[in-house]
Image: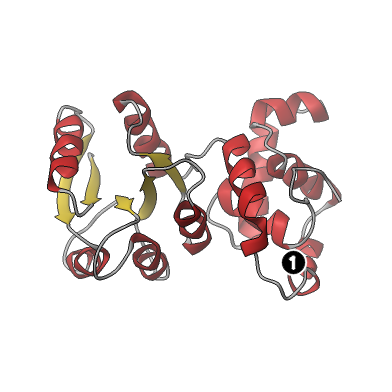
Amino acid sequence: MSIRVMLVDDQVLLRTGFRMVLAAQPDMEVVAEAGDGAEAIEVLRATAVDVVLMDVRMPRLDGVEATRRICAEPGAPKVLILTTFDLDEYAFSGLKAGASGFMLKDVPPAELLGAIRSVHSGDAVVAPSTTRRLLDRFAPMLPSSGPEPRQKELDRLTEREREVMLLVAQGLSNGEIAARLVLSEATVKTHVGRILTKLGLRDRVQVVVLAYETGLVRAGGGAV
């Protein structure tokens, strides 16, 4: 079954380019398009979509608020934020709003296609190190109410799960975590899955965000 993709961007030329790239793939189809966030939300009410490619800077309703509203709905499609500038504050806000990752608009086609497939399969598409770098830059934007209220959420985790979560937040891949803890990659993947379930998170991106919010990791990537 093809991955149903929606393109959301106020630039028609960009949507056309993305559509041409996706149309050449046997496992993807563009089922909807929108020129801004408000139109995207309206279209999604009547169209089944698996992955949304979401621009951030658009008229009427920007991509961040649109992402927040879309991800708040049950059974929501996965959202991949597209941004013009690396480490854009809008990309950070998009991750906080529930997006599964972000990419630059000038990403090579092969990487974009791989990202769509990864998002569709439930993975985050932002490299952990890139996510950490993004959060390091915008750590001051995290809630200022202090880590204690969310710190209690970590009590649901076993000691090993906390250990894995810390390494995920520090930018290590599953393979690197496996080598560090002398585990198989399959075991690490299982631990990550349990962490997501216990904490009610969508993907690795949100694991990193929560690690910063609880103070498990400080800006700069170091453990507390």
Residue 221 lies, in percent from the top left, at: 75, 43
Q: How is the image coloured?
A: secondary structure
* Left or right: 133, with 46 as reference point: right
Residue 21 lies, in percent from the top left, at: 19, 30
Residue 135 lies, in percent from the top left, at: 63, 50
Q: Residue at x 60, y 38 (%)?
A: 128
Residue identifier under label 1: 153
Depicted 222 relative to depicted 27: above or below: below
Q: Is residue 121 visible?
A: no
Q: Around disc 1, counting alpha carbons within 10 Å, would you say few (fewer than 14), some (14 to 19), or many (20 or more)?
A: some
User: Which is nearer the eye, 210 or 132?
Assistant: 132
Say which quarter of the image contains residue 85: top left
Going by the numbered disc 1, the residue's amino acid type is Glu
* Label 1 residue SS: helix
Q: Residue at x 40, y 62 (%)?
A: 64
User: Which is nearer the eye, 130 or 77?
Assistant: 130
Q: Residue at x 82, y 53 (%)?
A: 158
Could you tell me which quadrant the N terminus lies in? top left
